[in-house]
Image (cartoon, rainbow, N blue to C red):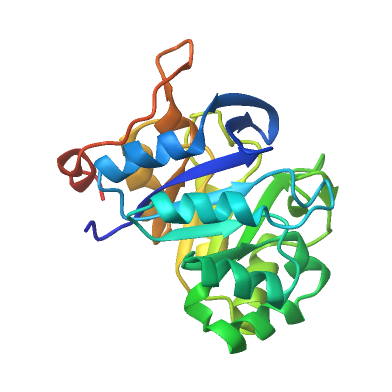
Amino acid sequence: MLKTRVIPTLLLREGGLVKTTAFRAPKYVGDPINAIKIFNDKEVDELILLDITATTASKGPAFDTIADIAGECFMPVAYGGGISTIEQMRRILGIGIEKVVINSAAIASPDLIAAAAREFGSQAVVVSIDVKKTLFGRYEVRSHSGTRGTGLDPATWARKVQDMGAGEIMLTSIERDGTMAGYDLDLIRSVAAVANVPLIAAGGAGKIADFGAAVASGADSVAAGAMFVFHGPHRAVLITYPSRGDLKAVI
C-alpha cells in the first residue's frame, strides 16, 4: 500500500458512470461495474463513489446500485450522494461500504455529522467540501453539486466539520474539476492549515506530478477522476491507473 492514498473518484448519474468538467456537462464513460473490475485488477487501495444527481433531484441513495458495486469491489469504498439520514447511512454501511460521504446534508444540518460519528465512528464519516471562487475571488463552499452558494469560507467550515466529528475531509475545487490542469494548491494550503483530520485533495489532477504538488501543499491523500478515465488530447475513454513505481516516485 502507498503511504499516500491515490483514490479514483467515480461519478454516477442514473446508474451510469460519467465525468464532469467544472461540475457541468457530464460525459458518459461507461458502466461502473466494468470500471471497478479494472481498478480491482490494478489493486487500487480505495474508491470514492459519488452519485452527482441524487441530492439535486431530491432522491435518496440508489441502494441496489450501491449493493452491486459493493459486491464487485475488492477495495474499500466511500459512497456519497443523496444521504441525509442516519438510517440511510446505516443501510449503506450494512451493505458493505466502508465510509459515507456527506456534503449538502452536513451544511443543512451540521448535527448530522456528530450523530453519524457517534453511531458509526469518525473513521466512517467523510465530509465533502466543494469550493468555487466568487466574482470577487473569494473561496466559497457550494452545495447541491455546486449549484447553490452557502456563504461559508472553506477553512472555517473545515474546522467546524472536524470539530463535529468528521474523520476525513474531501476538498474539491469545482473550477478545476475535470480540467486536468492541476490542483488548486492555494485552496489546499488554506484548508490544510486548519485541518487536523486527513485531507483528500480533489479537482484538477492531470499528471502524476500533480499528486506530489498536492501532498507538498498539505493534502494527506489525493483523488482524481478524469485522469483515470480519459486518454490523450481528445479525451478518449480509457480506464487506467498509474503503476506503483511511478506513484512512489512522487508521493
Residue displayed at 42% across by 34% down: 34
How many labels were placed on the picture? 0
**Is residue 193 at least partly visible in the picture?**
no
Quarter of the figure with residue 28: top right
Q: Residue furthest left?
A: 245
Quadrant (top left/top right/bottom left/bottom right) for the N terminus: bottom left
Please tell me in which quadrant of the rendered image residue 129 appears: bottom right
Q: Residue furthest bottom?
A: 118
Tell me which residue sits at (74%, 46%) in the image.
145
Give percent across and percent down for residue 250: 24, 45
Residue 36, position in %: x, y? 40, 42
Q: Is residue 49 above or below residue 237?
A: below
* Residue 60 against residue 12 in the figure, above or below: below
Q: Is residue 113 left or right of residue 194?
A: right
Image coordinates for residue 77, horizontal then vertical, percent: 45, 58
Q: Is residue 212 left or right of residue 185?
A: left
**Residue placed most toward the observer, 250 or 243:** 243
Which is more toward the observer, 30 or 109? 30
Q: Residue at x 56, y 63 (%)?
A: 191
Residue at left 48%, top 16%? 235
Return the x and y of residue 113 as percentages of the image width and height.
67, 78
**Residue 34 appears in the picture as rendered:** yes
